[in-house]
Amino acid sequence: MLPRYFTVKNYGDHEINIQKSRFIAYIARAETEEEAQAFIQKIKKQNWDATHNCSAYMIGENDQIQKANDDGEPSGTAGVPILEVLKKKQLKDTVVVITRYFGGIKLGAGGLIRAYGKATSEGIDATGVVERKLMRVMHTKVDYTWLGKLENELRSSVYALKEIHYLDTVEIETYVIEEETGHFTEWMVELTNGQGEITEGALVYLEEDVEK
C-alpha cells in the first residue's frame, strides 16, 4: 500500500464549448481496469448519439495500467492528451471519458489535442482532487477522568481525531502516520501517566482535499 497518492474525489462532469463543439468530461475513480471499462461503457451508452466518446485511465500503485482510446478521432489527438493530463497531475486510479458533440468546425490535430487536454484538465478541477494518506488507527482506552485533557491535547496536535466511543471507559480513535505510531504511543503513555491502554488498529486511507 502506498504511503500517499493523489486521485479524484469521486464522480464529476463538466462541459466546455470550443468552436461550436461540445466537450463533456466525465471523471471517476476506478481501482481496477474492469471498473474503468464499465464506467467508459456506461458513458458511451448514455451518450450513444455523440460524435466521439474518447477515454483514458491510469490504474495501479505504479501506474502499471495505462490505456487511451481515440474513439474515431485522428490517432493520438484525444486519448493520449487525456492520459497526459492524468500523468501531469499525478492522478492514480482515475478514469476519464470526454464526450464530443461535433459542432461543424474542424479543429485540426493541434486544436483537438488542446481541446481534449483542456476539457480533461477543467473537468478534473471541477471534480476535485484528494491526497490519500495511509494512516494507522490508534485506539486509546482511558478512564473518563482523562477525557478532557486527552481531547484537548489531541485537537491541538498534528494527529487527526477519528472518533470517541463512550463506553464503560472512553475509547479514543486517532489517525496516525505509520512511522509515528511509536512516538504517539509514548506520548499517550506520558499524558495518562501510564494509565491508558494504547493499541494499534487497522490501516486506512485518510483523504484530504488538495489543489492540483
Image (cartoon, rainbow, N blue to C red):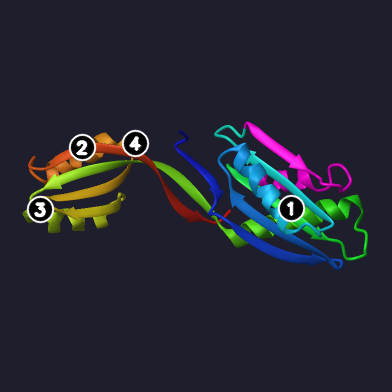
N-terminal of the two: label 4 or label 3? 3
Magenta stretch encompasses residue 36? no
Kindly identify which numbered label has been placed on residue 178: 4
Displayed quadrant of residue 47: bottom right
Is residue 117 placed above or below 188 in the rendered structure?
Answer: below
Magenta stretch encompasses residue 85? yes
Residue that label 1 marks: 44
**Residue sitting at 87 percent across and 62 percent down?**
102
Tell me if 82 is positioned left or right of 193 in this view.
Answer: right
Q: Nearer the viewer, mark 4 or mark 2?
A: 2
Residue 61: x and y in percent read: 54, 34
**Residue sitting at 21 percent across and 50 percent down?**
172
Residue that label 3 marks: 146
Region rendered in magenta: 64-91
Q: Are marks 2 and 1 in contact (CB under 8 Å)?
A: no
Badge 3: residue crowd in 10 Å (few <14, some 14–19, many ≥20): some
Badge 4: residue crowd in 10 Å (few <14, some 14–19, many ≥20): some
Label 4: which secondary element: helix
Q: Are marks 4 and 3 in contact (CB under 8 Å)?
A: no
In this orientation, does residue 125 appear?
A: yes
Displayed quadrant of residue 76: top right
N-terminal of the two: label 4 or label 2? 4
Image quarter of the N terminus:
top left
Between the residue at mark 3 and the residue at mark 1, the CA separation in whole angstroms equals 57 Å
Q: Are marks 3 and 2 in contact (CB under 8 Å)?
A: no
Label 3: which secondary element: helix
Front residue of 152/169: it is 169
Q: Nearer the viewer, mark 3 or mark 1?
A: 1
Label 2: which secondary element: strand
**Residue sitting at 93 percent across and 59 percent down?**
106
Q: Nearer the viewer, mark 2 or mark 1?
A: 1
